[in-house]
Amino acid sequence: METESADHLIRFRDRGFLDQPVETVPTDSITIGYTPRSDGEDTEYTKLLAEAADELPPILVHRPTMHVIDGAHRLRAAALRGDTHIPVRFFDGDRAEARLLAVAANVTHGRPLSTADRTTAAGRVFASHPHWSDRAVAAVTGLSARRVSQLRKHTPAARTGHRVGRDGRTRPVDPARGRALAGELLRSNPGASLRSIAAEAGVSPATVADVRDRLRRGEDPVPSRRPEPDAAQAAPADALPPISLESRRRPAPNPEPPPGPAQLLRIFDSLRRDPSLRLSESGRNVLRMLGACTLVVQDREKITATMPTHCKEQMAQLAHGYAGLWRLLADELACAATAEAS
């Protein structure tokens, strides 16, 4: 599993599981084994699902062990309703993959994992996959890459010299060290292929080619870095903009880049499949609102091109106003999620 990428789990979580056929399986043949939740079952959530009139969505089960990967509350709800069978999609990977998939699935589907559970899950990933990059661990656990980097510092995984990214490619933690090693290998064995040197040094063949060219020109394999500008020169005090009282009241901006269009659609798709939203009137109202927003994600350029000229200025004002309200809602939701997780 160490050589596998994190992306294959994310792809399976987001869309790949839909390719698996739905099978009707006896409820008493399925067990709840490993769970990434420290607080156990949410009985109120289970009752909400049990009282729904619609058929419960398929759960995800690890076929070799018949343990639930995603859908423990749905399985409990089915038993509470007296259902003898439940729709199931199967995952056929190994046990380690199933545990990672349980974390990845519960980050976005149904009742999301708490911050504490995600932090615990990151620790397990460090133990089982110490070479996974911060972004790979973040993709599976739902934490930010910055938070994962902070957590890694206190684990043996911090001492690994190379990291495996989400794409499965291995990269050195310190590129300068890989370049220096590639230079030593080229000097000792000039006839070796770029790929063999790259594999031994832990860098890409393109990097080895660049190191070889630098050696031929009599240059150091590691390009010299430009010195950091003096802080006083880079940002003189009188050039800094004043901080308004309003900006002091605002929460600190999110250090992570905002989700792109494709990620926005994936997030909406996961919410759309969440039974706790689908099976309540307030939840369906939220989903209808979000469904309208996906049109902006998909047809933004078309909307701009087809909007009548005399309406564009008013539409811009309206969009700016709604954007401000969305930011307020985002801040309120983030604060509420943090408070409930603590």
Image (spheres, helix red, strand yellow):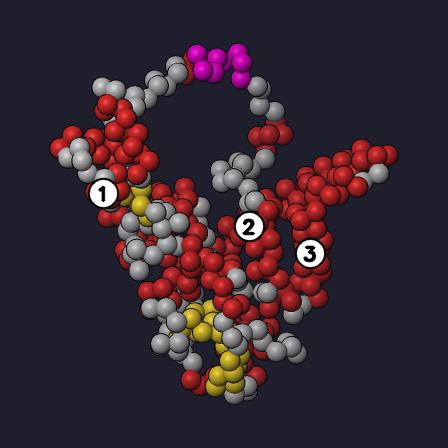
Say which of marks 1 and 2 sits in front.
1
Residue that numbered label 3 is attached to:
291
Magenta extent: 233-240
- Label 1 – label 2 distance at C-alpha: 37 Å
Q: Earlier in the sequence, mark 1 or mark 3?
A: 1
Q: Nearer the viewer, residue 268 or 305?
A: 305
Q: Earlier in the sequence, mark 1 or mark 2?
A: 1
> Measuring 30% from the left and 23% from the top, which residue is drawn there?
223
- The label shown at residue 263 is 2
Q: Secondary structure at mark 1?
A: helix
Q: Is residue 68 left or right of residue 181?
A: right
Q: Position of residue 283 (x, y in %)?
A: 66, 62
Q: Secondary structure at mark 3?
A: helix
Q: Position of residue 195 (x, y in %)?
A: 26, 42
Q: Position of residue 285 (x, y in %)?
A: 71, 60
> Measuring 55% from the left and 45% from the top, which residue is drawn there?
259
Q: Is residue 326 shown in magenta? A: no
Q: Is residue 34 left or right of residue 179?
A: right
> Measuring 60% from the left and 30% from the top, which residue is drawn there?
247
Say which of marks 1 and 3 sits in front.
1
In the rendered structure, which amino acid carries the disc numbered 2? Gln
- The vertical placement of 306 against 50, above or below, is above
Q: Position of residue 117 (x, y in %)?
A: 41, 58
Residue that numbered label 1 is attached to:
196
- The vertical placement of 197 against 121, above or below, is above
